[in-house]
Amino acid sequence: IFASFVFISYIVNIFYYDGKIVDIFEIVRYLLSGYLILILLYMNKYYEILLKGFVTGVIVSILFGFLEPNNLSVDIASFSIPQIFNPNVLGVVAGFSVFFMVMLEIYKHSIKNLFIILILIALSVFTFSKAAWLIVFCGLISYVLVLFTSNNFRKRYFILFLISVIFLLWYFGFIYHVIDVIMWKLRATSFESSAIDGGTFSARLGLILSGIYMFLDNPFFGIGISNFEHYHYQNESLLGDSFFADDNPNSAFVYILAGAGIFPFILWCLIVLYSI
């Protein structure tokens, strides 16, 4: 039903913009999103195998992104560290993959789950993406909570393991480097700067506002899938210093609201709520 509504929006907006067949595949991006994957997999008796297969694919993709970074390396102290490409996309997917593994842990504790989660955490570090780090950190906290509510888990050994890791990180000075990186990323956000001056917060706020303007202009059918970039430039004068050129609003919810209209947006929200 969701895909049908988005397709109708696409057909309607062909009369206003130049539609391309490839634009239809934009729908697949959301049909394959984490929320829908969870719903489909947990309806399937082979969900565990399929879920681990998906996470394995994510890890392989991130490794390829690490080997072919295509981004400038990040200099920290005397180290030059490659940045995974595409950092935000792969980082967020890695974060959701941690949650997927946590959900497997709820049903069956396995040391393999911990190993996979540690790999995802290690790889997410090289994204240098605040969103990725935040999601992975929340996933790690969820994993710890799941472990401590398990009767079969030896909590004393896990606490000893954590203390040992923290001590080693402090002893070799890695904690200070981590703090430096976090502060560097926060400064890069530049809450007080405009998008023109390089403020990422202002730029993302402008993209979201642009998407809302698109929805208000076309509440029922939206502007059509894949037309965000074209319509976004028309809002440049409205956004002023918050304008930042991009082909999406950096939010799935706003993208669906602007691109497909109110009805697919409501369905999407219901899908998300159902999966939760």
Image (tube, helix red, strand yellow):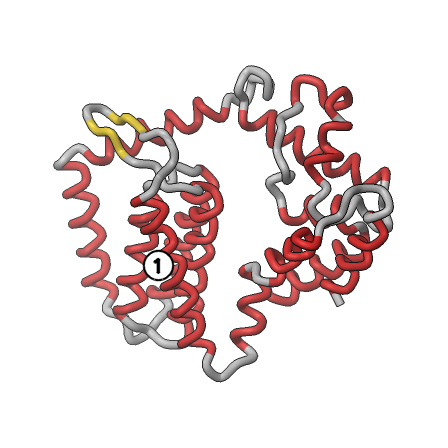
Mark 1 closeness class: few <14, some 14–19, many ≥20 residues within 10 Å: some
Q: Is residue 151 above or below residue 265?
A: below
Residue 243 vertical position relative to residue 60 in the rendered view, above or below:
above
In the visual, does 45 lie left or right of 1?
A: left
**238 sits to left or right of 89:** right
Instruction: Please state the horizontal and vertical placement of residue 149, each as a whole percent of the image.
Output: 37, 68
Question: Residue lying farthest bottom?
Answer: 45
Q: Could you tell me which secondary element the residue under label 1 belongs to?
A: helix
**Residue 276 in the image: above or below residue 141:** below
> Could you say which is closer to the camera, residue 159 or residue 12?
12
Which of the 4 quarters of the picture holds residue 160? Answer: bottom left
Which residue bears the numbered disc 1? 144
Residue occupying the point 33% across, 41% down: 126
Residue, x 35% and y 29% (percent of image)?
72
**Nearer the observer, 72 or 162:** 72
Quadrant of the snapshot with the N terminus: bottom right
Q: Looking at the image, how many numbered discs can be counted on the residues?
A: 1
Q: Amino acid at mark 1?
A: Val
- Residue at (34, 50) in percent of width and height: 64
The answer to whether residue 162 is left or right of residue 54 is: left
User: Residue 135 vs residue 76: left or right?
Assistant: right
Q: Quadrant of residue 237?
A: top right
In depth, the one of 52 and 178 nearer the eye is 52
Q: Position of residue 192 (x, y in %)?
A: 56, 18
Measured as percent of width and height from the top left, residue 93 is found at 46, 53
Give the residue drawn at x 19%, y 24%. 78
Residue 13, percent from left and from top: 83, 48
In the picture, the quarter occupied by the C terminus is bottom right
